[in-house]
Image: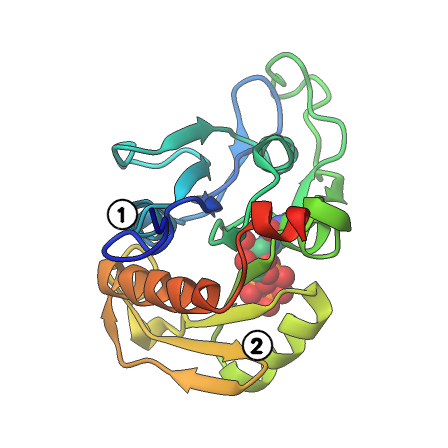
Amino acid sequence: FFAGVGSKPLAGRRALVTSGPTREPIDAVRFIANHSSGKQGHAIAAALSHLGAETVLVTGPVNLPDPPGLSVVHIESAREMLDACQQALPADVAVFAAAVADWRVKDAAASKIKKGKGAPATLELTENPDILKTIATATGNRRPALVVGFAAETDDIVKNATEKRARKGCDWLLANDVSPASGTFGGDANTLHLVRDGGVEDWPRMSKTAAADKLAGCVADYFKDHPAREAEAAS
Ligand code: CTP
């Protein structure tokens, strides 16, 4: 009778999670990408699903299996990621863990660029849409009740993250210490700081799966005090 209690506190909630890198084509066979493993984003999607949320995971190319029990959408470019996210809405909670390329090649070639035949000395880049910002600043039921972003920082972590949270319009921001000493990239552990209205919570270094469970627990706590989407619509 009481949906949302017990071991499935997120039952009846919809979650959207982005994960992994994006690939931005240069031509038919080449692309720009980054080293994101998708481990953190995939673990978050699995953790939210485990707590009962109906979860859509939008992911760039990673060497990870699709987590069972949730809907996985595979994309390559940032623009495809944005489209897939828009299609997954409405959602109660959205977590943007993907390492989206900030830039793409302005006019990607449809066929392979041959060397010596007009191969470009420079690539002209253009800015990609900011998926987190687009969805965090959307209106009506296109704006999830709880929007969580990530910030990869090496210095002044909490100060930069606090500013980034305001700039992006998200509710919570998880600042990720990616200084070379942290071994975060591609590694199995993360040192995170959760920035939200009430202040900053410094989490001890922990595995990416433990961090995902901890975040999912915070999300469940948040929704304890917030009516379900249906209830909101009915009231
Ligand atoms: N993000 C996004 N779409 C983009 C770029 C980033 O959704 N085009 C999201 C990421 O998923 C992450 C957050 O925004 O949640 C990171 O913001 P970004 O401005 O890229 O910050 P950093 O990667 O931390 O880099 P920088 O400090 O250079 O701004």
Q: Residues within 10 Å of mark 1 (few under 14, many from 20)?
A: many
Instruction: Name the element at disc 1.
Output: helix
Q: Which residue is mark 2?
A: 161
- x 70%, y 65%: residue: 169
Classify the position of ligand 1 by quadrant: top left, top right, bottom left or bottom right.
bottom right
Q: Which three-letter amino acid code belongs to the residue tagged 2?
A: Ala
* N-terminal label among 1 and 2: 1
Determine whether 97 is above or below 153 in the image: above
Residue 124 position in % (x across, y down): 76, 39
- Front residue (pair 231, 93): 231
Residue 17 position in % (x across, y down): 46, 46
Instruction: Name the element at disc 2.
Output: helix
- x 40%, y 74%: residue: 179
Report the mark closest to the observer, 1 or 2: 1
Q: Residues within 10 Å of mark 2 (few under 14, many from 20)?
A: many
Mark 2 beta carbon near ligand 1 (under 8 Å): no
- Front residue (pair 110, 233): 233
Residue 156 in sight = no
Which quarter of the figure has residue 6?
bottom left
Distance from disc 1 to disc 2, alpha carbons, whole Å, reads 28 Å
Determine whether 222 is above or below 100 in the image: below
- x 46%, y 28%: residue: 73
Q: Which three-letter amino acid code belongs to the residue tagged 1?
A: His
Q: Is residue 108 left or right of residue 175?
A: right
Residue 110 position in % (x across, y down): 67, 14
Q: Which residue is mark 1?
A: 50
